[in-house]
Amino acid sequence: MKFIFLLTGILFVFIIAFLFSNNRKKIKYKRILVMLAVQIILVYTMMNTSLGLIAITNVGVFFEKLMAVADSGIQFVFGGMVNEGKTTFFFIALLPLVFMSVLIGILNYIKILPFLIKYLGLILSKITGMGKLESYFAVSTAVLGQPEVFLTIIKQIPHLSSKRLYTICTSAMSAVSMAMVGAYMTMLEPKYVVTAVVLNIFSALIIANIINPYDLDDDEDLIQIEENQRVPFFQMVGDSVMDGFKIVITVAAMLLGFIALMELINVIFLNVFHFSFQTVIGYLFAPIAFLMGIPWSEAVKAGGIMATKLVTNEFVAMLNFGEISKNLSDKTIAIVSVYLVSFANFGTVGIVSGSIKSISEKQGNHVSKFALKLLLGATLASVISGTIMGIAM
């Protein structure tokens, strides 16, 4: 039965993406099938083999230890502000991002991350048949996140075609940075977060191959990756601290605004229509959730969470999901958890567009023109990842 839902979920994504494709005749079906096969192999290996489970468990434990290390700094600065036995999202999930940002900065500084990203990108390009730049960028976004990742190809962005620009922007919205992974693991099962990070790399490229297919000449693909100018070590640490803190404040501000806005909308709906706004959008997304493999009895609740992510952001959706997940099946929890781990929402479209525009006014205008198609592509990529996850449960 699970393979039937694999077909329904993938077929749904393909039909929608095909309808919005820029060039249906150039869709590389073989390339898409290869990436789907790789995803299926990866998810089965990660979730259903002893080696995969050990690896994914160790990754989760590693991030838990990192969060514990980060907590030492939080306790020194803010210790005693939270009553014993109580938890605060700002302290538990957000503030550790400052330490994670520093750690990523150090790994970048000593050239470990650039080495891994470069060669993983080359391997990925062999598997996917995509350009070296696209593959490099897909791996980069799974580590660095956006908008920072755009700085690694700052000299290439003004010269990219609109088609290649769409592909890298889809990857940026479909992936999440390693700095955010620890925060997500405080709200979702770590194994699902790790699995989603891996699946999303391929899901974004699958969608790009359907909505935005194109061929590259060898000369066109040979684009060197720009390295940032080296700064003194402690300046880099200080910059990383401030970058991490800016992310914390930005996410906290967005949560304050979006959660309050959602509550206002719910109050209006409850007073006027006598049912919540989440229920309405839940019914709209319920058929999609069902096609992904979620039982119909849970599809409305799952659909509401999926839609919440789209109209607000993944943090708001994860917090809401935590409140209802105790009453859902393991399969639904797995599928929705993987779906939630990406930046596919309206707010991120603005961030991506603004980031590109700050580098190139012309390219930023191109991104603005295909903004809604970009959001569609990133959302469909999340549907693919969630659907693939369903066959392992």
Image (cartoon, rainbow, N blue to C red):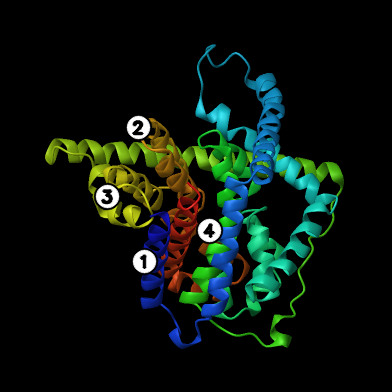
Q: Residues within 10 Å of mark 1 (few under 14, many from 20)?
A: some
Q: Earlier in the sequence, mark 1 or mark 3?
A: 1
Query: Circle 2 is placed at which residue position?
Result: 327
Q: Which residue is under mark 1? A: 12
Residue depicted at x 13% and y 41%: 273
Location of residue 327 with respect to 342 vertically, above or below: above
Separation of marks 3 and 4 at Cα, in angstroms: 22 Å
Dot placed on the residue nearer the N-terminal end, 4 or 2: 4
* Residue at the disc numbered 4: 174
Which label lies toward us, 1 or 3? 1
First in residue order: circle 3 vs circle 2? 3
Distance of mark 1 from mark 4, alpha carbons? 18 Å
- Give the mark toward the camera: 4 or 2: 2
Q: Which residue is mark 3?
A: 281
Q: Callout 4 environment at 10 Å: few (<14), some (14 to 19), or many (20+)?
A: many
Q: Tags 1 and 4 in contact by the CB under 8 Å rule?
A: no
